[in-house]
Image (spheres, grey):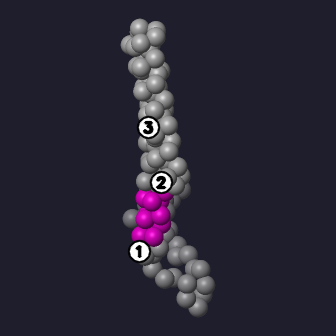
Amino acid sequence: MPSTSRKAVIGILAGLSIVVVVYSLIIVQQILLGLIVAVVPWFLYLLVRFILTLERIATALERLATARARESEPDRDGPAGNYQRPSESYGHSTETKGGVENE
């Protein structure tokens, strides 16, 4: 959301909150009703902003982790193409039929 429209939304929300609180004080004469009605939109606005900010942080961290993984990964694409080496433990821990290694 651009900065100007965000400021407009905040201005409208603030004006609406003030009108509701003044109405609840003067006309209805119940401050709690006005505060509840005025606080709920602010709470929802802040909750949405918080969720969007967390989403942006998570996206940035994911990009950072992907970039670091690419930097730390050695260049294995040589003349053999995308070669995968067998694991180091392959064939080292084989057991005999009885479950005990040969001596």
- Who comes first in sequence, dot 2 or dot 3? 2
In this view, which residue lies farthest toward the top? Answer: 29
- Who comes first in sequence, dot 2 or dot 1? 2
Q: Amino acid at mark 2?
A: Ser
On whether residue 38 falls in the magenta region, the answer is no
Name above or below for residue 90 compared with residue 100: below
Left or right of 97, for residue 17: left
Rounded to the nearest whole Å, what is the CA distance between mark 2 and mark 1? 38 Å
Badge 2 marks a residue whose secondary structure is helix
Name above or below for residue 55 compared with residue 92: above
Near mark 3 (Cα within 10 A), the count class, few <14, some 14-19 or many ≥20, is few
Badge 3 marks a residue whose secondary structure is helix
Q: Amino acid at mark 3?
A: Leu
In this view, which residue lies farthest toward the front? Answer: 26
Near mark 1 (Cα within 10 A), the count class, few <14, some 14-19 or many ≥20, is few
Q: Over which residues does the magenta segment extend?
A: 59-69
| Residue 34 picture location, percent across and down | 43, 17
Residue 89 visible: no
Residue at 46% in and 40% down: 11
- Who comes first in sequence, dot 3 or dot 1? 3
Residue at 43% in and 76% down: 71
Q: Amino acid at mark 1?
A: Ser
Q: Closer to the camera: disc 2 or disc 1?
A: 2
Residue 22, picture quadrant: top left
Mark sitting on residue 3: 2
Residue in front for this viewpoint, 62 or 72:
62
Rounded to the nearest whole Å, what is the CA distance between mark 2 and mark 3? 16 Å
Q: Which residue is mark 1?
A: 72
Residue at 46% in and 47% down: 7
Residue in front for this viewpoint, 71 or 41:
41
